Each structure stands twice: as C-alpha cells, then as structure tokens.
Image (cartoon, rainbow, N blue to C red):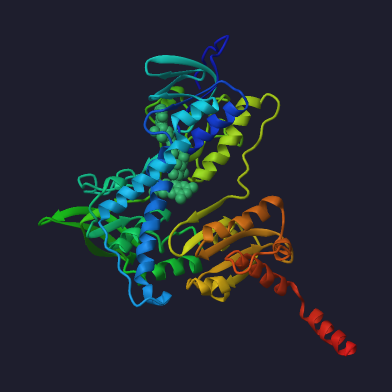
Amino acid sequence: MKTYSKPAHFEHNLIVIGAGSGGLVSAYIAAAVKAKVTLIEKHKMGGDCLNTGCVPSKALIRSARFLATQKRAQEFGFKSASAEFDFADIMERVQNVVKKVEPHDSIERYTELGVHVIEGAATIKSPYEVEVNGEILTTKNIIIASGARPFVPPIEGLKALDYLTSDNLWDLRKLPKRLLVLGGGPIGCELSQCFARFGSKVTIVEMAPRLMIREDEDVVDLVTEKFIAEGIDVKANHKAVAFRENNGVKEMVAEFEGEEVIIEFDQVLVAVGRAANTTGFGLEDLDIELSPRRTIQTNDFLQTNYKNIYAVGDVVGPYQFTHTAAHQAWYAAVNALFGRFKKFKVDYSVIPFATFTDPEVGRVGLNELDAKAQNIAYDVTTYGLDDLDRAIADSEAHGFVKVLTVPGKDKILGATIVGDHAGDLIAEFVSAMKQGAGLNQILGTIHIYPTWNEANKYAAGNWKKGQVKAWQMKWLARFHGWMR
Ligand SMILES: Cc1cc2nc3c(=O)[nH]c(=O)nc-3n(C[C@H](O)[C@H](O)[C@H](O)COP(=O)(O)OP(=O)(O)OC[C@H]3O[C@@H](n4cnc5c(N)ncnc54)[C@H](O)[C@@H]3O)c2cc1C
C-alpha cells in the first residue's frame, strides 16, 4: 500500500462518490449530523435503482400485471375484457413513473438537506483528495458508492449483437417478437414475465438446474409452473456457448446434457449478473484491494484497506439491493464520522429481499438450502395460501408461507413466502427476527380480517400445533372427560 502525506486541514468531513441508493443515504446521514459533505455523481442522480433498476422494472411489472389480470376476466365474473395497447405507451408510462420519483433523489432535494452535490466524474487521487471537473477537493473520509453494471459474459458472437441489458432496455419502444433472456436470476425472471405478458415469445435460458437458484425448489417450482402456463419457454440446465446470425436469423447455441441446442430469437436480454464498478477512478492507483468476486474488499466496518476510505452498495456486495446499500450507508457514514468514539460492525443477520414475479417471492434469513449448506438444524412449518380467505376472495389462492425455526425453540431462522404480496407480507417476519420475537408473538398479535397478513398468523398457528406433544392432547381429552 502506498503512503500519502496527510493535509493539515480538510475542506470536507466526507466525500461520497456515486449518487445511487448507497451514496444518497451516506450523504443524507452526514448532512443530518451537520458534517460537511459533498456528493459526486457522473451520470444520473438516483443511480440504477431509480433510472434503470427497481423503479422502471416495478412500473413495467404493474402494466404487465394489468394485462395478465384482464386476460383472466372470466375468473372475476366478466364475460370478456380486452386491452388494446401500444408497447411504446407502456414504456412512456414507465418513464413517467421514473420522473415522478426523480424529485426524491434530486440535486435540489439533497442541496436542501445540506449536501453539496457536484455533477461530474470523481477520481480518487489520494486517500485525502478527490478530483472532479479539474478541481481537487480535500477530505477526511471518502465513501465509494460507485455501484455495478450488467455483466456481459465473454460468449462467442454476443458482443457483435445489438444485445439488451437492464441499462438500455428502457429505450425500447418496439416489443421484440421473440425475446431470449439469458439468465434466470431475479432480474431475468421479472423481465421475462413482463415481456411474455405483453406478447413476446420469451425463452429464458439458465445454466443452473432451475431458475432463481438461491431459492428453495418448492418455491421455484411454483414460479416456473406459472411461467410455463403463461407461455414462457423455460430452459434450465442450458449453457449458452455461442451466438450467430444464420441467413439473417439470430441464433443462440446452447449445451444441454451434452447435446447442442439452437434457439432462434429476435432480441436477446443479457441478465447474468452485475459486475462492480471498480475501475477508471483511481482505485487501481491507490491499490485498493478487491475481493475474489472483483468487488471492493472491506472489513466489518466497511473500511477498505485505507481506514478512511469506505465502500457501500453494489460495489461491495454481498447483497445487491437498494435497501442493503442504504443499510450499509448508515454504518459507513457513522463509522467515518464518529469512528474515533465508537465503530459499528455492519449487521447482515436479518436481510430481506423479494423477487417481483407473479407469484412473488419474499424472503428473510435462511431458507432450507442455506440451512442445509450451513449445517444448521431446523424445523419447517408451512401454511398454504389456498386456505386463506382473502386469497380465495381475490382469486389468488396459491403459494405458501414457509418458516424455519430452531428445533424445539420459538426462534425464527428465516421465512420464505411465495404468492401474491409476498414482498409485503415478509415484513412481519423481518420485524420479528430483528426484534428477537418468535412465532408465539405473531400468533398472539391481532391481524385484520380478511387480509393477506393473516397468512403469517396461520403459519405461526401451524407451528404452535406442531409443538404440542401427543401425550398433552391425550391428557387434555381426559381432563375434559372428567369435567363432563
Ligand atoms: C432491473 C433491475 C431491477 C432491480 N430491482 C430491484 C428491486 O426491486 N429491489 C432492490 O432492492 N434492488 C433492485 N435492484 C438492484 C438495485 O438497483 C441496486 O442494488 C442499487 O441501485 C445499488 O445502489 P448503489 O448505490 O450501490 O449503486 P448504483 O445505484 O449503481 O449507483 C452508483 C452511482 O455511482 C455513479 N458513479 C460511479 N462511478 C462514479 C465516479 N467515478 N464519479 C461519480 N459518480 C460515479 C454511477 O453513475 C451511479 O449513479 C435492481 C436492479 C436492476 C438492474
């Protein structure tokens, strides 16, 4: 590691590089505690989440869902329903949604909050100096929140194609007739379903044995069944090996069980993961350490190998979510500004996330795959949403709540919900785990009838029933016999 001379005085307490979720929250916290903070953004305020990630994808999902519901008109008691649409209008709606959310992340808002915002590309010159627009700013601390970008795998012929990623997809105004989606993770799955619902013939190709490989098999099975029912061609266990054009027809060559499979398509969306943005802004010159996954290596306090340079969000991982970037931002900002008094280790013990497919998948903590991989003993309790009154009323009675607990104890290890509103429903388990509450507390809490939330209570009820021993039931029956 190089050594650098430290200025006697600093213009800033903190400089934050990147105004995505991680950078915005870091700067917000610093300004809230009256630190002098500058936030530097080279592209668009709000980063990926606002411009090319969460916000546009959720807006697109909503429009696609409208169409899917309309196609089920008879299930809801209508003779028929139709929806005429122009895909360009749908994409314009998506942009309008982004514009409506934009003020939340705007320069005006952050300036009002006390953050000095600079538009420009930042380069770290030394642990105490950041260059932007030809000017050198001195700072006691730096937070790197430079995010990630779609990873484009080095597959023969792919670069030569006009491929789509989550970066440029939002410029589409014409619906692809045949869309090939490379990657069956959350982004690939969410977008596959949207495009299929709008009428593209979608093929989703995944190298692993199934979609959403980090989720339990019974969870993924429900999502896959729905995809297939909606006409998506799900090709798991298929490894893309080459792309080519044959007489003007685009083709992908894949390997499946040792055989060559050819898949024709009009456009391809590459969604195989996201690579951290770690080059071109000084990290190499400073020898900032990277992890084997090519993310910035930090310690538990989110410090890089320079004690005053921190990193948060997608550029660090291990999670790549807006809310985890924001969570890390608190630790990095507080450790940077108050670390001389007390430093906090980032807490990854209760991390929730959701995949906004239909059915939705919401998760917190361990699932069965994790528990098995980590050799953690667990009990499983499930509650089927086909039994839930509100789900039946909504004609969405499918899916389940699955809770993992420590055997014989009221301690939640994790929960997965697959079904409508799963991303919202999981919040009760997130709170319970965070507050150290168990299923007894969920069971003892009044849930409004008829709501989807009741599913959590019924899952807790199933767990409770499972805790009762056979001899206790026998004894109770005998007791009531005596009482008659
Ligand atoms: C299609 C899609 C859907 C998603 N859906 C969800 C979801 O539903 N829920 C969820 O939680 N997450 C979702 N995500 C993930 C989420 O968008 C990211 O986890 C989040 O944006 C990470 O925030 P960040 O601050 O780390 O990085 P980013 O948002 O990428 O921000 C980094 C910023 O740094 C800037 N920058 C980089 N280098 C420099 C430099 N040298 N100088 C100045 N500026 C620089 C970039 O321009 C960028 O604006 C989704 C992502 C995608 C792609």
Which residue occupies the extreme top position in the image? 8
Marks counted in the figure total 0
Q: Is residue 298 above or below residue 417?
A: above
Q: Is residue 48 above or below residue 19?
A: below
x and y, in percent, of residue 441 in the image: 73, 61
Question: Viewed as shown, does residue 114 lie left or right of 192?
Answer: right
The residue located at (66%, 35%) in the rendering is 344
Question: Viewed as shown, does residue 108 lie left or right of 153?
Answer: right
Q: In what quadrant of the picture does the C terminus appear?
A: bottom right
Residue 456 visible in rendering: yes
The residue nearer to you, when weighing 423 against 165, is 423
x and y, in percent, of residue 180 in the image: 27, 58
Residue 275 visible in rendering: no
x and y, in percent, of residue 102 in the image: 42, 38
Residue 444 occupies quadrant: bottom right
Which residue occupies the extreme left position in the image? 247
The residue located at (58%, 9%) in the rendering is 8
Question: Viewed as shown, does residue 122 lie left or right of 115?
Answer: left
